[in-house]
Image (spheres, coloured by chain):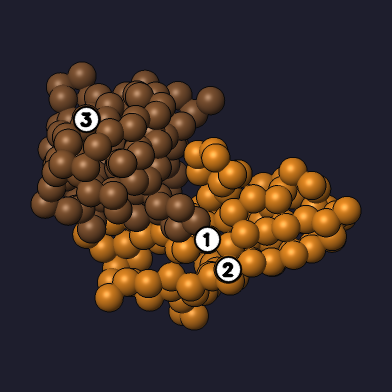
Chain colours: A orange, B brown
Amino acid sequence: GQSLEQPSEVTAVEGAIVQINCTYQTSGFYGLSWYQQHDGGAPTFLSYNALDGLEETGRFSSFLSRSDSYGYLLLQELQMKDSASYFCAVSGGGFKTIFGAGTRLFVKA
Amino acid sequence: DSGVTQTPKHLITATGQRVTLRCSPRSGDLSVYWYQQSLDQGLQFLIQYYNGEERAKGNILERFSAQQFPDLHSELNLSSLELGDSALYFCASSVVEGATSEQYFGPGTRLTVT
């Protein structure tokens, strides 16, 4: 079967760095994506990794290790507005995109 | 604004009824995806269309059906509605056909079944 695991909640303070991990098990794999969703809003695309390594986009970075079926999203210089849910998603076999259950990030002042 | 539009924004209906949700993808995008998100849950992939053809199917109930029209807008039909169908329904679009790196989500339709 196909599954993704990520922590349900993470809490960090403003200005800190936080890492949200994601492990996956899929039949077929094209890449790992990350999305942010604020309460009541739509998911917005953050990053995508198809190859091993680190991708950096401003304060956000994403990492992938295909051999370990593992990735993470790194958020630096946390701001209050980063409080949201973060979903990892796998593009896998059968043209399906599977989303994890989401990690709720609480940023404290 | 992602460029993906969905109507209606809210829908309240009774059990046993049928509703149609509508989605217009971003200009130039050929793929449309439908997702269901129940309260405090993740996104459940329902179905994908590419240029009018069904491309992938997820955990979509037999009571649900979808189609993509020649102008690329898509409709999700939900019938014989049950209380458990109450959820946010998102449509997303992308330019590529297959497994995609980047999907753009519409604002969603909040369906309440009473």
| Mark 3, residue position | B20
Q: Are marks 1 and 2 in contact (CB under 8 Å)?
A: yes
Q: Amino acid at mark 3?
A: Thr
At x 72%, y 58%, the residue is A106
Q: Which secondary structure, mark 2? A: loop
Q: Amino acid at mark 2?
A: Ser
User: In the image, A22: left or right of B83?
Assistant: right
Relative depth, front residue between A13 and A34: A13
Q: Chain of mark 2?
A: A
Relative depth, front residue between A23 and A65: A23
Relative depth, front residue between A10 and A66: A10
Specify few, some or many for label 2: CA neighbours under 10 Å numbering under 14, 14-19, or 20 or more: some
| Mark 1, residue position | A102
Say yes or no: labels 1 and 3 on the same chain: no
Residue B103's place in the image compared with B60, above or below, is above
Q: Chain of mark 3?
A: B
| Mark 2, residue position | A8
Q: Earlier in the sequence, mark 1 or mark 2?
A: 2
Q: Chain of mark 1?
A: A
